[in-house]
Image: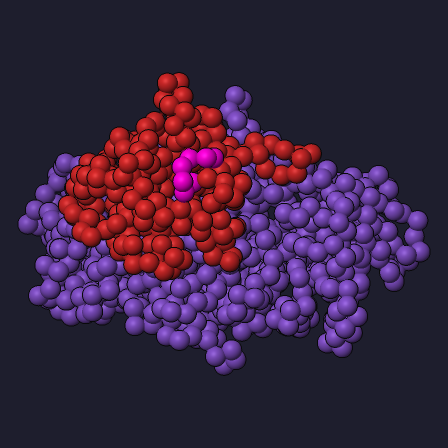
Chain colours: A red, B purple
């Protein structure tokens, strides 16, 4: 499984994503510059976190016009598996590869913290059986407030497209909802209807090593890899 | 001395004015300094030249009032054990110091202030402070891997202070987060002395191989000088001079002296520079354009390279039209660098910068001789010996006299308080934990991306932060702590200086790290006031004595003077940061208790001093007494002992006593994820001891360890054998309750840890809450 990590100017989780895919599953990964027009022999595409083009205009709004995005769109249309993390998720929404939009956090501040995610039933690879009930994964963003209209939300729910929701954390006595950004329906990650394009605000690449807040990112990365291996996008 | 020819008129008629004493004064140049300029140039300077002297001879660039003091700092490490830690680039040689960490690798780090810009424009002031220090680090050839900051604000009860605090934190977050460098630690204090003049000191640390070290020297006559990065505008004009005078009501009008940062531009610049510097032999010298912009970078590189430099301003990328030579030379527009390239390899540089869509313009070349020559529209507008602007600038030993208030504060004794009432002892803990200086800083660091680069092992909130370094196929860990209690420095500048350094060292020891080197940021008031200069002189002497005792070299730093408000100078605040190394990840230790049943062991003896304590401030409204005593030999023995226990696997957690004292330290150890409690029974307490001093005094040289029950007797015996007072003080409980009693005394205090945690967690978020916005 050959992974391509796209580097936009301002990407800053590109090395982390590269290391996570290259060292944890131990699979070949390479960087692809945003001015390139081809993904070469990539079998999985990762859009990493960061501040592509400084988040100017809107997060991801300029990156979607980078030359490589034509190739990424073609790759996704042919059923190739694409994962967008944080800024990558924002780019995928701006590019129309995922529905909805990510707006300013409700608290109007950047938030960096480890959150608990509830795994939803979102297909053969993203479900409780594969990933467990709950995951502890870091978030770090200023614009992670997922927004979609009522019809769109119904459609996400109906088609099992919600991957993760922010969950309550702490003991039963002191149970608070830990939605860090005010996203609609506590959504933390989604997939497209076809099941080959995935976007999430939390950073699984920051939860893979023994000293990280958890190692719950590993099953998430594996789920993406399995989706790619099985040709998830074909006929789902 | 040669008499130079008068320069031709400047192409901008506005600049062709007579240099009057008023104009000299307006540039912050003293009459005797102007005499020196006349003598050395052999003619009247042009206005552009006057501007150049004004910024280069400002305190910010020249350290003219602090340089003699800084010579006391040890520049090198003398002991050869451990084998790493040699200083590869010393303080003052380059933009930042470099220290060996073994196997051909090194770290490079420095702290720098952006106090005055942050006072008038908190967001941009703090953001560009972060941008500036990051450039200082990647200029050296290093990849930045972490940021920390030391912040000081007035009382949070003031709306203006809250505005500044909010803006500074958001500005730091904005810049650091976008750069993708984790902000992993720091310290924040609140004290009325900082009202109107906050302190914003930002630190960056990078990693590099020895063979990647770059110098800021212009050498090789004929080598082209490149300008790379953002274009030059009229922002930040004379920022270095602005930073070198007191703030006043009129300072708001100086807002154009504050720069506007663009972290996206800097991210591109950093990546492009690192890519360029990785090409063997391509870069001869490199320096960022920080304070005093193009002026400082060109004369400093020439001076270091023992060469001359010629710059043509027409080739400088400009974002505004009609800029004259004065403006271009003094602009502090951000995200720019000066690069001296190996002649004949210009296209290689141009290609790298084209990839990143950045400017790379050849603006001049290295010349024979020693002069910095600046040309604009065909006319020489400045022609000055480069070293006159740098090494040969004025240096002063200012007048010093002991501040009058010290007699009064030293005369204070705890007897004046009377016996502490039991309710006071009970309530003080919650009040101390709710003091913004002591309270949880989560409100601050949750706005910083402290996990990017996926290497943060100890996140903000423990004694020191720890970050994993990837060194080829090996890994090591760097620990970093920032410290300085301005209250101690106010009450005893010498001892306050020692304590700042020693507390930092203690924090590293508690984390399991071996100290490498120190960087410092000296924040003081106006040095022309003898009482202010005294506090600086004494604090620096304290820092230097502590560094020599510990054999920790000072590899660089920053001096920020003129930090004053209408009530006078800020508390003397020599901020210290020491970086340390951990080779085995098993030795990384946090301050949080993990296992119920573990014993708590206090090393160093029961505290017995109240002078300068937070308790005295919060419960009695006093800033009085002497700073706590400090014993350098005792500290060294203690730190070595703590590290030994950690390395041999006996210390589950380690935490030092600092602001708030003993019980605050115990409570802080219980604020981890596990939600535990502690039962303390203090034995062998002096029957005459003041319980407020025991519970809340801030005596130095104290560390609390948690140890397995089976190990505690051995640790107590070993500590005593090493000459360290040691007491078993209690047990970690599974339920979140904290209780304390003393053998032979009737007082018994008890708190719910959840209540204490609420005080501690909510203090800052509640003070900073905005109506209608979820926190």
Left or right for B291, reference B587: left
Which stretch appears magenta? Answer: A120-126
* Residue closest to the eye, B653 or A149: A149
| Residue B18 percent coordinates (x, y) | 20, 43
The magenta stretch spans residue A123: yes
View extreme (top): residue: A150
Q: In this figure, what is the number of numbered marks?
A: 0
Q: Quadrant of residue A197?
A: top left
Q: Is residue B120 above or below residue B53?
A: above
* Residue closest to the eye, B335 or B680: B680
**Residue at coordinates 35% horizontally, 49% vertically from top-left?**
A225
Q: Main secondary structure of the magenta part?
A: loop
Q: Quadrant of residue A77?
A: top left
View extreme (left): residue: B378
**Residue at coordinates 23% horizontally, 69% vertically from top-left?**
B305
Viewer can see residue A95? yes
Q: Is residue A122 above or below residue B8?
A: above
Q: Quadrant of residue B27?
A: top left
Left or right for B15, reference B621: left
**Residue at coordinates 61% horizontally, 43% vertically from top-left?**
B440
| Residue B559 percent coordinates (x, y) | 44, 55
């Amino acid at each position: 499984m050959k992974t391509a990590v796209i580097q936009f100017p301002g990407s800053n989780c590109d090395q982390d994503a590269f290391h996570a895919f290259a060292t944890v599953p131990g699979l070949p990964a390479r960087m692809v510059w945003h001015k390139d027009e081809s993904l070469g022999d990539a079998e999985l595409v990762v859009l990493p976190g960061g501040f592509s083009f400084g988040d100017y205009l809107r997060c991801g709004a300029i990156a979607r016009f980078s030359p490589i995005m034509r190739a990424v769109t073609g790759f996704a249309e042919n059923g190739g598996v694409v994962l967008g993390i944080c800024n990558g998720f924002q780019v995928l929404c701006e590019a129309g590869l995922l529905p909805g939009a990510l707006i300013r956090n409700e608290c109007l501040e950047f938030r960096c913290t480890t959150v608990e995610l509830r795994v939803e039933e979102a297909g053969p690879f993203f479900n409780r059986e594969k990933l467990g009930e709950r995951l502890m994964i870091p978030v770090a963003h200023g614009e992670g407030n997922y927004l979609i209209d009522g019809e769109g939300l119904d459609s996400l729910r109906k088609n099992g497209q919600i991957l993760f929701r922010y969950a309550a954390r702490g003991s039963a006595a002191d149970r608070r909802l830990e939605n860090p950004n005010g996203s609609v329906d506590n959504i933390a990650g989604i997939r497209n209807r076809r099941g080959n394009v995935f976007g999430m605000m939390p950073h699984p690449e920051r939860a893979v090593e023994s000293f990280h807040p958890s190692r719950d990112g590993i099953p998430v990365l594996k789920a993406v890899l399995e989706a790619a291996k099985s040709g998830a996008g074909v006929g789902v | 001395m040669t008499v130079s020819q008068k320069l031709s008129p400047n192409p901008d008629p506005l600049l062709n004015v007579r240099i009057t004493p008023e104009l000299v004064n307006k540039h912050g140049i003293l009459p005797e300094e102007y005499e020196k300029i006349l003598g050395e140039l052999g003619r009247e300077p042009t206005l552009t030249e006057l501007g150049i002297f004004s910024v280069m001879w400002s305190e910010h660039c020249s350290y003219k009032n602090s340089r003699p003091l800084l010579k006391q700092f040890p520049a090198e490490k003398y002991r050869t054990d451990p084998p790493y830690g040699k200083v590869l680039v010393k303080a003052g040689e380059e933009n930042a110091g470099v220290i060996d960490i073994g196997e051909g690798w090194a770290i490079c780090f420095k702290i720098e202030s952006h106090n005055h810009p942050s006072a008038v424009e908190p967001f941009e002031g703090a953001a560009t402070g972060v941008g500036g220090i990051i450039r200082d680090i990647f200029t050296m050839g290093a990849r930045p891997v972490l940021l920390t900051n030391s912040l000081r604000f007035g009382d949070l009860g003031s709306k203006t202070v809250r505005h500044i605090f909010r803006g500074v934190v958001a500005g730091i977050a904005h810049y650091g987060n976008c750069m993708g460098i984790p902000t992993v630690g720091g310290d924040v204090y609140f004290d009325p002395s900082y009202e109107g003049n906050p302190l914003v000191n930002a630190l960056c640390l990078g990693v590099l191989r020895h063979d990647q070290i770059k110098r800021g020297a212009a050498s090789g006559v004929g080598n082209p000088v490149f300008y790379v990065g953002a274009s030059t505008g009229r922002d930040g004009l004379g920022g270095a001079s602005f930073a070198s005078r007191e703030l006043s009501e009129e300072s708001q009008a100086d807002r154009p002296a504050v720069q506007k940062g663009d972290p996206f531009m800097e991210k591109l610049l950093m990546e492009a520079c690192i890519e360029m510097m990785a090409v063997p032999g391509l870069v001869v010298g490199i320096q960022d354009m920080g304070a005093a912009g193009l002026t400082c970078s060109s004369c400093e590189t020439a001076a270091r390279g023992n060469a001359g430099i010629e710059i043509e301003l027409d080739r400088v990328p400009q974002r505004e039209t009609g800029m004259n030579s004065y403006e271009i030379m003094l602009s502090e527009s951000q995200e720019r660098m000066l690069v001296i390239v190996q002649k004949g390899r210009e296209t290689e540089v141009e290609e790298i910068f084209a990839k990143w869509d950045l400017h790379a313009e050849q603006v001049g070349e290295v010349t024979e001789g020693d002069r910095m020559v600046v040309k604009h529209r065909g006319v020489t507008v400045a022609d000055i010996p480069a070293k006159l602007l740098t090494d040969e600038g004025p240096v002063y030993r200012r007048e010093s006299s002991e501040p009058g208030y010290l007699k009064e504060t030293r005369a204070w004794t705890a007897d004046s308080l009377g016996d502490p009432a039991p309710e006071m002892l009970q309530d003080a803990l919650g009040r101390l934990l709710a003091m913004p200086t002591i309270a949880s800083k989560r409100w601050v660091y949750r706005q910083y991306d402290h996990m990017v680069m996926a290497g943060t092992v100890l996140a903000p909130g423990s004694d020191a932060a720890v970050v994993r370094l990837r060194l080829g196929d090996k890994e090591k860990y760097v620990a970093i702590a920032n410290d300085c209690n301005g209250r101690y420095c106010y009450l005893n500048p010498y001892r306050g200086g020692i304590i700042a350094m020693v507390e930092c060292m203690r924090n590293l020891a508690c984390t399991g790290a071996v100290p490498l080197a120190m960087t410092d940021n000296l924040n003081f008031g106006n040095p022309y006031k003898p009482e202010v200069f005294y506090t600086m002189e004494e604090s620096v002497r304290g820092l230097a004595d502590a560094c020599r005792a510990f054999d920790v070299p000072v590899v660089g730093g920053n001096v920020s003077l003129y930090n004053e408000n209408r009530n006078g100078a800020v508390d003397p605040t020599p901020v210290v940061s020491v970086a340390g190394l951990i080779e085995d990840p098993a030795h990384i230790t946090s301050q949080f208790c993990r296992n119920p049943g573990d014993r708590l062991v206090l090393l160093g003896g029961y505290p017995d001093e109240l002078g300068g304590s937070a308790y005295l401030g919060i419960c009695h409204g006093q800033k009085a007494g002497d700073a706590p005593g400090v014993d350098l030999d005792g500290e060294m023995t203690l730190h070595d002992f703590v590290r030994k226990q950690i390395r041999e696997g006996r210390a589950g957690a380690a935490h030092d006593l600092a602001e708030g004292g003993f019980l605050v330290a115990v409570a802080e150890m219980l604020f981890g994820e596990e939600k535990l409690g502690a039962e303390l029974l203090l034995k062998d307490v002096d029957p005459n001891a003041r319980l407020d001093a025991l519970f809340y005094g801030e005596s130095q040289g104290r560390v609390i360890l948690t140890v397995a029950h089976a190990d505690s007797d051995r640790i107590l015996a070993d500590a005593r054998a090493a000459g360290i007072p040691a007491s078993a003080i209690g047990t970690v409980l599974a339920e979140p309750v904290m209780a304390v009693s003393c053998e032979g005394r009737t007082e018994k205090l008890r708190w719910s840890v959840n209540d204490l945690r609420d005080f501690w967690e909510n203090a800052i978020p509640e003070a900073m809450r905005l109506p209608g916005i979820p926190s």
